[in-house]
Image: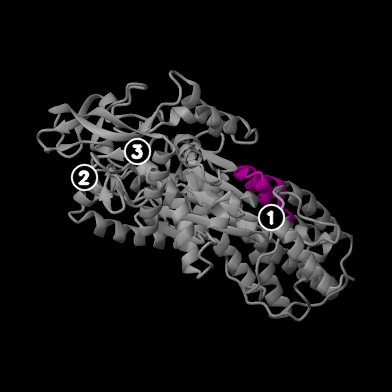
Amino acid sequence: MINPYQLTISKIFFGLLNFCALEKNYIKNRTVIMKRILITSALPYINGIKHLGNLVGSQLPADVYARFMRAKGHEVAFICATDEHGTPAELAAIDNNTSTEEYCEKMWQVQKDLSEKFFLSFDFFGRSSSPSNHELTKQFALQLNKNGLLKRVEEKQLFSKEDNRFLPDRYVIGTCPECSYERARGDQCENCTRQLEASELINPRSVLSGSKNLELIKTDHLYLMQSKLKDKLLAWIESKNNWPIITTSIAKKWLLDGEGLQDRSITRDLKWGIAVEKDGRPWEGMENKVFYVWFDAPIAYIASTLDWATSKKQHPEYWKTWWLDDHGAKDVHYVQFMAKDNIPFHTLSFPATLLGAKQSWKLVDYIKGFNWLTYEGGKFSTSQKRGVFMNQAIDLFPSDYWRWWLLSNAPENADSDFTWTSFQSCINKDLADVLGNFVSRLAKFAASKFGEAIPKGSKYTNEEFEAISEIEKIFKDYNDAMTKIEIRKATSHLRKIWSKGNEYLQRSQPWMKIKTNEAEAAKIVRFGFNLMLFYSEISEPFIPETCLKIKSCVGKSKDSVEWSFFKDDFETIFERVKFGAKFKPLQNLFKKIDNKEALDLEKRFAGTDD
């Protein structure tokens, strides 16, 4: 028996050590070693409601990992924010006939509300337009300048005579010089992910007026001399031999292909954004300029952590323990989630900013990159009303329907395609026929034969121990996949664990046992309810709303989720729902989608050709 006082001292001691190896979850006396996990998902642009592809490309898998790490007992900071600066915000505000500031404030609330409806468990959902991000961005620029990593470059930028203004970034569209995509933006081609300058586009035209009467005019901009940091960046990237192939391949492409890593402008000729200032005054020659959105947006991860700490009334230096190695961040494990178009900025530009500042800033430990999610063989399109967006999705079906399909089909190793046929099949077979069938079948049988209290029954026998043994083997694979952030593989293992519940019921047949041996039938019910509780805990990262319903059914809704591999004896986790405990009758967890409904939805969201 461990002395409680000794256990407390042990926890404090090993908590201070903060070992970096994620899988060292035990010490000799089985005390859990707490770790600090920083998780960020790519900032969603403020310009409108995001579609399913945006959701599964960053925020949703990040939420799965955050929930998993919390369940393992670690201290988690899951940070996100809206990306509010740059041309996307200005153009969206123009389209909505409002000021950029008012538009951003409104859409931040819309995106925050939708994230809550999808049960995204952010510890803080901030804004890149926050005062803290303004201040931090300016500080980074000054530090980079002090370290000799900023230079002033006279360049030629497209100017529209018809619009009477410079056209940076997304104010210009044209043909990509790399892949010939005809609607490439002036900052990046979304088709091949190449970073671009607007002047590189073939046949450029103004997004505002459609005018092709554009002229290259000289203007000064600040450039971050990334090329000076190439060797450091390459050494850092090559040290990450456990990163997904998509992450390292895209990073090395921009580092090594062609002329290699190029110096990049960090300012733009825009009104909305973070002014290029020092002590409240514009830098000489930088009047009426703001920092480039891809310079300030990643810094918002840091600023949002600061804002989170402030909102929690933490010590003023607390946020630094997550971000500065000399304040304790060496013991933080930092994981980023993003779609592949964001990878160049997070493997090159943002790390260059952090390295160039020379202030012990925390670099990311693992970047989970994702491919694209397509819709019925094509792209999601707002203008053509093609595909399902988050607000539409949540009006159609509960959040867990979407979470399960998206995560079980996550575009990890290749692009994935959403089809209504696939969605219907996945929901009906996995959720309704496997998990839903087990829970509903058991709860209804128990209520009809024993009332609304867990019956005692006999002791567990080989039937139960066999089921436990089978589940434990799969669970180890499930835990391993979750630790490695292999999302699709994890859902496959979880599905197998669910199926073991139905197999157990089929083998034990309580509806037959009740006729001749009530104690045996009661035992099966008691074990089944323990299985239900176990399922609600291990499934929570994927389908949290459903798991809360199951926990409420067995009277455990207020219990925190603790993953069972912290137990010395796996069998003990199936003894937590006790004899006599009250349970609530549970209706069918999932409603099946019939063929007509799936076909109607396919037609409804097919879009137009306009």
Query: Label 1, on which residue?
Result: 498
Q: Magenta part of the protein: which range?
A: 478-500
Left or right: 335 in relation to 199 = right
Q: Amino acid at mark 3?
A: Ile
Query: Label 3, on which residue?
Result: 266
Q: Residue at x 65, y 63 (%)?
A: 536
Left or right: 451 in relation to 31 = left
Q: Is residue 334 magenta?
A: no
Callout 3 touching callout 2 (CB < 8 Å): no
Mark 1 neighbour class, 10 Å CA radius: few under 14, some 14 to 19, many 20 or more: many
Assign a secondary structure to mark 3: loop
Which numbered mark, 1 or 2, is in the foreground of this view? 2
Looking at the image, the residue that sits furthest to the top is 258
Q: Is residue 495 magenta?
A: yes
Q: Amino acid at mark 1?
A: Trp
Mark 3 neighbour class, 10 Å CA radius: few under 14, some 14 to 19, many 20 or more: many
Of pointers 3 and 2, the one earlier in the residue sequence: 3
Q: CA distance from mark 1 to mark 2?
A: 59 Å
Of pointers 1 and 2, the one earlier in the residue sequence: 2
